[in-house]
Image (spheres, rainbow, N blue to C red):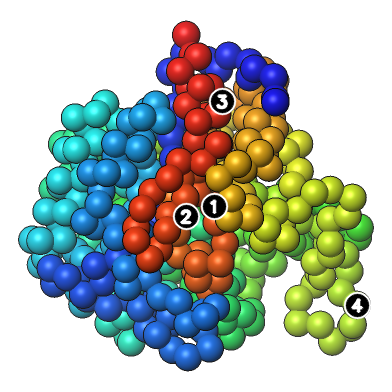
Amino acid sequence: MVDSLPAFPPGFHFGVSTASYQIEGAAGEDGRGPSIWDTFAHTPGRTRNGDTGDVACDHYHRYAEDITLMSGLGVDAYRFSVAWPRIQPEGSGPAQAKGLDFYDRLVDALGERGIAALPTLFHWDLPQALEDRGGWLSRETALRFGDYAALVADRLGDRVRRWITLNEPVVHMAQGYAFGDHAPGHALGLAALPVAHHQLLAHGLAAQALENVMITNNMTPVIADDPVAGTAYDAFHNRLFTDPVLLGSYPAFLADALGDVIRDGDLDIISTPLHALGVNYYNPTRVGAPSSPDAPLPFETLPVEGVPTTAFGWPVVPSGLYDLLTGLRDTYGDRLPPIYVTENGCSTDDVLDDRFRIDYLDGHLRAVHRAITDGVDVRGYFVWSLLDNFEWAEGYSQRFGLVRVDFETQQRTPRASYHWLRGVLAGRS
């Protein structure tokens, strides 16, 4: 068994994270419109076993049970996402009252248990109607997102103390628009770059409509076998979505590639001051020079060798989280706001005695604590995820939950990692 964790600073937030399409289900209820993930998952061959999020964890109906699990765990906060198609089925126009009512009930129920609500406004389930008009390749989607953010804030803003605008814009751009592995399934290569700018513009517009705003991105420390490739990969994966927000500028060669997509005043909007920066960390990335001179990208990803891997095949390197956090401090200095680790976790075999996950969480929490000790202002840590869920193109084949879900019966069963983390949180002073 792992040793006791060191004490975190007073006020440090421990939480769990989920996302709407991955857990809510109720895909056709109460006026919810179709999202790009509904369309993608129902297209043959797009997801493992043809799995969809039609029912998922049925959180829409079972949220009270899930909040009881959170309360029993002892977390301070719950990071969830709002399904844009529940609020605006067509991606524009007035709010759908029943959609807002659900999140109203959710936030109230969390408050009754002393759990802070941390809503993410976009976790990849774009209304299909907006995709039909160009999706994130279109500037219109950024403008509509600003309207949507204001509608949600008008209903929930009296109880929500901080917001996240976008989740992992780099993954949505790359997997959804550049490579086609995720919804909406486009394989545009570098022609997907406008998606980055329009997502960031959407973030900035929402930041102007909200108080205490964060953006959260999947970030990775780069292990560079080739320095030029390493710099390029860091620019695409990390700095493309952090420099504009914190510095008001893009890395030079990416600014050139975006060209006329960037309009006067856009970067002023995008760099609206942040309350905090959200960091999702799963693994470092090793890169080298492309193996062919005709390769479309200036880098090639390589295996990280000599370390354990998750059931997903991702390398487990807790020290990479320390490197990432200290690297952000060293790169951005006093431009860097406080940091929340908004996702960290692993998929394991479908077992209840998930000692692998306990070791994983223990190692990464120690890395966060070491970064805090070395002067990085980290304010919170959120486990991905509370529940087993619909893992995008992998369907239900990957198990990330502290709580096991039987998708046939919807029975929830806390795993050993749930009980371990409950003990950790109960031991806080």
Callout 1, which amino acid? Answer: Phe
- Structural crowding at the residue carrying mark 4, measured as other residues with C-alpha within 10 Å and reported as few (<14), some (14–19) or many (≥20): few
In whole angstroms, how far apart are the C-alphas of marks 3 and 4? 39 Å
Residue at which label 4 appears? 291
Q: Residue at x 59, y 50 (%)?
A: 351
Task: Check the picture and name the quadrant holding the N terminus.
Answer: top right
Labels 1 and 3: the sequence-earlier one: 3
Q: Residue at x 55, y 45 (%)?
A: 352
Labels 2 and 3: the sequence-earlier one: 3
In whole angstroms, how far apart are the C-alphas of marks 2 and 1? 5 Å
Labels 4 and 2: the sequence-earlier one: 4
Q: Which numbered circle lies on residue 377?
A: 3
Q: Quadrant of residue 237?
A: bottom right
Residue 287 placement, left or right of 62: right
In whole angstroms, how far apart are the C-alphas of marks 4 and 1? 34 Å
Rendered view: 411 above or below 211: below
Q: Is the residue under label 3 in contact with that under label 1 (CB below 8 Å)?
A: no
Labels 4 and 1: the sequence-earlier one: 4
What x and y, as percent, mark residue 249?
A: 56, 54
* Helix, strand or loop for disc 2: loop
- Structural crowding at the residue carrying mark 2, measured as other residues with C-alpha within 10 Å and reported as few (<14), some (14–19) or many (≥20): many
Residue at which label 2 appears? 388
In whole angstroms, how far apart are the C-alphas of marks 1 and 3? 27 Å
- Label 2 or label 3, whichever lies nearer to me, is 2
Q: Residue at x 63, y 36 (%)?
A: 358
* Helix, strand or loop for disc 4: loop
* Helix, strand or loop for disc 1: loop
